[in-house]
Image (cartoon, rainbow, N blue to C red):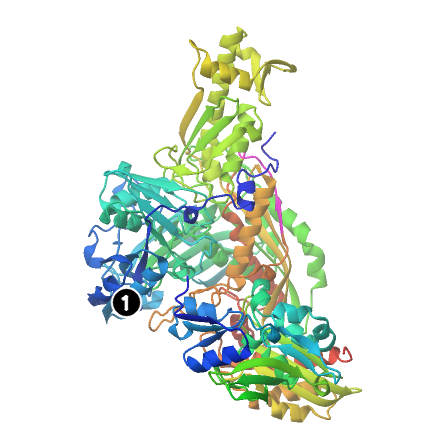
Amino acid sequence: MFAMENYHRATDLNDAVRALAAHPEARVLAGGTDVLIRLREGDGAFAHLVDINGLDELRQIDMDTSGTIRIGALATCTRIIEHEIIRSHLPVIAASLATIGGPQIRNIATMGGNICNGAVSADSACALLILDTELVIQGPAGERTVPILGFHTGPGRTILRRDEILKYFLFRPGQYRGIGAAYCKYAMRSAMDIATIGCGAALRMEGDIITSLKLAFTVAAPTPVRCPRTEEAAAGRRLDEETLALLAGIVEDDVQPRTSWRAERDFRMHIIRTLVQRVTREAANQQGGN
Amino acid sequence: MSVGTAVIRKDARAKVTGKARYTDDQSMAGMLVARYVRSPVAHGLVREIDTSAALALPGVEAVFTYEHVPTTLFATAGHPYSLDPDHRDVADRLLLTGHVRYQGDEVAIVVARDELTAKRAAALVRVEYDELPVCTTPEAALAHGAPAIHEGGNILERTELTFGPPVAEAMEAADLQLDGHYNTPVVLHCHLENHTAFAYMDDNDHIVIVSSTQIPHICRRIVGQALDMEWSRIRVIKPHIGGGFGNKQDVVLEPMVAFLTLQLGGVPVRITLDREECLVATRTRHSQQVTVRAGLKRDGTITGIEMDITSNTGAYASHGHSIPMAAGSKFRHLYPRTAIRFTATTHYANIPAAGAMRAYGSPQLFFGLECLLDDAARSLGVDPVELRLHNVARAGEITTPDGGTRYAVAIARCLEQGRDAIGWQRKKKELQNQDGPVRRGLGVAAFSYGSGTYPACVEIAGCRLVLNQDGSVHMQIGATEIGQGSDTALAQMAARTLGIDYDRIHVVSQQDTDVTPFDTGAYASRQTYVAAPAVHEAAERLRQKILAACSGLTGTPARELELAEGRIIRAGEPAEEIMSLGELALSEYYHKERGGQLVAEVSAKTVTNAPSFGCTFVDLAVDIELCQVTIHKIINVHDAGRIIHPLSAAGQVHGGMAMAIGMALFEELLIDPAGGRICNGNLLDYKVPTCTDIPELDCAFVEEPDPTSPYGNKSLGEPPIISPAPAIRNGILDATGVAINELPMTPKLLFREFRKAGLLPG
């Protein structure tokens, strides 16, 4: 039994946005794997719900003629992981989502929810960041498209206004073609856990020279982050032990892990330094896959 | 030949098809639900409590606070009653309290028509506290001037045990003396079915309690004590139960549901704890500090062991000091030629109450002992398996208290078999001189345990067998099936002794204290061992009654008759059937002048306690940079006597090993020492391992029948959890040279220790 106060099942996107605009206290219910937990805990902020599960247009996964891939915000993790387009072109998205929860969670949880809840530990965030994913958002005044970088504004916070709904993720061919990418979720368990540190890397190489590195971390700062200093230092360098050690040193300036009862700053920083090297190496091993 | 084969469990079909009915599957018209109001502070006195808002909520039937409950203190530990007043459990509980002693303590309870209303109402009870200083650790709780958590101070008990020659002399005779200090955390049971119970009255004099309990008969007595009622006026029913691991060897909800129904005129009232409550507001495994000192000769002979344990029992005594004492009395069988001095202190603290948990203190104790012995082996340059083989108990070395019978002892063969299974000698050579970030290691640890609680407690079991009209047999036993498979094992035994098919034995699995023969319940790995004599004797008596009845019918002397596969035959001549059991039964029931229902009932006490043994071998890899341990192979080898049901036995071992790996590498309840706040009282943050975290688990049995059981069996329920943690620790030591003396060996701890050892940059 849940202590729900108001429940509205939206009939279409406009209806959903209207309902959100009319009830400022209302929250969006997608897969429910976060919202229902909060409600069960008695969190009154989640007692007014606009259920968007009837919005089938948000479940689409497709690719247009230009090669831009669109994933609907309501597509479940399992569907994305198993989708042929994703397996062929965005394997790092599939690999990242496969680290979320367990099979039952992934069968109902959505990638939209994973991002919109603002979690610092969101498992899809690193992959979305290193692919420079674009987000299409619907509000009362219409649609806007924003980059994932900057979407998160703090723990549990995003740029989404209360009356806005995330529609699609867009992946441009210029971002995903010709890269090698990898994600590592470092957690205390190998399933049903939140990341202690998450690290994603996307690499473009010419021979053994790094032409560009995109590097992202979760739980390493108040939001998921990219690592501009490390990325800049990597460009033009040979991918070898020396470079990796250098990057492991520089990354400290790109992140601000904190001490909590879950893990100490020193420990997180050590894992970050180790993962920079291992995940970059793994990304290089994935080169040429797509 | 049902004993020793993997017959289909009595409850298998009902459980896998969802037909088995558990406590929560039962409902009654008008049933109310109750929910506790819990303290957010870890230590304090209630200054003011206001229930008016809760009472005003529609759907709320009643609110009771600590001011409304009986003032008689009671003990909750699921031990048999003791005739010796000095040996009784500490009575330190009330149904509700105004002096809260841990975060989650119970100050009031709300009764409502549904769960949601109860939850809302509980949140509406306003309580103000005067906070008291908080002690969560032994250092704080035992410090001079520490605030008294209970009247009489924070020390529950201190005791000393000695075995063998004087330890001081033994230590002097040693070539090497070594110390070690080991810490084990608060661990949670995480059984699938949360605590749940309901109670009702169907007359004016009796209270019926339906509960998920391991100890129905003990529960009856404790509820009677708590409510100051005649024990026979309490009736406890135990349906199917979804696990307990010791957490239900305690009386937790039953006195409260009984109290509530009594207050509310017999209306049925249920309490079902949610997962978070069940994790922190029931019982836990004691966190212990284990200090071990051992003396050894150069050849590896252990001359003496001194062990001191400080055991944190938390807010209430529950099983309290029995935990270190039980472990202290069981470990000596592993190294019986060694002088031993064992001391233990149990203290209160402002953390959740610790109680019984699988292997009852032994995992903590053996973590200390078996780690220290590996350190000693390294110091002496002796192979750790050889060191153990040199010192473990030998055949014939351990006898019954009267000296009349020698228990089976096969630990040396377990060690040899485990050593071969893991490829110890070959891999030891391969793994010399490793470097790099990922290194492999081998680990070993051994243990001893008991098969019951005698002579600390009474061991009593009961069995009633009834020959049915159709020639099958109904079996009622006091032994409590909690998923461990006792119904099946005991039916196998009865079938064997009676001479009928296992499938012709129907077990009445539900316990009902008004009906079921007396047995104190499922704990101490006792159930199969102590129920076996009662089953054996009852089956033997029923068999004789059957043969006598047949003899009366046929004129053939009973000594010339035999019961085999459900048929009465001429002794030694299976082809010559005199009559079927069904024919005999019909005649006994329905002949108008002669015969009668054939029944045999036995209540038997067990005055032996067979030691059981075993060991773990592990082959693992340590990723030093990522501070992660990967187990490649792990095997438990058990000396548990004759195996009654090979598949169930393997299941017990696998489950115990998985729990042990949790304790070794993952699980720890974190409590902030400053304010007593519980940091991770949920299954996201309390890291019980998932199936993906558990490696392939191997097990083997060295079957040496024990002469003190009619079927040769010894304990197996708890033992599998004891030795994996020290074996894993010893494997990490072998791989990295770093001795971790604390559990759980999480990445965070390994990071700290590897840095300290210089394996990672500081």
Residue B618 in the image: state x and y as whole percent. Answer: 62, 57
Above or below, B442 relative to A126: above
**Picture layout, residue B94 above or below residue A208:** above
Chain of the residue under the numbered disc 1 shown in the image: B
Question: Residue B670 at x, y = what percent?
Answer: 42, 68
Instruction: Please state if B665 lies on the left or on the right of B40 as rendered.
Output: right
- Up the image or down, A80 lies above or below A147; here it is above
Q: Which segment is the magenta one?
A: B698-712
- Whether B351 is among the magenta residues is no
Give the residue displayed 24% in from the left and 68% down from the top.
B127
* Among the 4 quarters of the image, the one containing residue A284: bottom right
Q: Is B415 or B657 nearer to us in this picture?
A: B657
Q: Is mark 1 on a helix, strand or loop?
A: helix
Q: Where is residue B151 in the image (x, y as percent from the top left)?
A: 22, 59
Of A180 and B571, nearer the camera is A180
Judge left or right: residue B48 versus residue B567. Answer: left
Magenta part, dominant SS: loop
Residue B126: image quadrant is bottom left
Which residue lies at the image location 41% right of the left edge and 25% below the top edge?
Answer: B601
Quarter of the N terminus of chain A within the rendering: bottom left
The quadrant holding residue B426 is: bottom right
x 70%, y 59%: residue:
B427
Quick one: quadrant of the C terminus of chain A? bottom right
Neighbours of disc 1 within 10 Å: few (<14), some (14-19), many (20+)? some
Residue B446 vs A56, above or below: the answer is above
Badge 1 is on which residue?
Answer: B124
Q: Which amino acid does label 1 sit on?
A: Leu
Asked whether residue B701 is drawn in magenta, I would say yes
Camera-side residue of A104 and B717 = A104
> Can see residue B171?
no
Q: Nearer the viewer, residue B204 or B414?
A: B204
Q: Which residue lies furthest to the right in this view?
A: A207
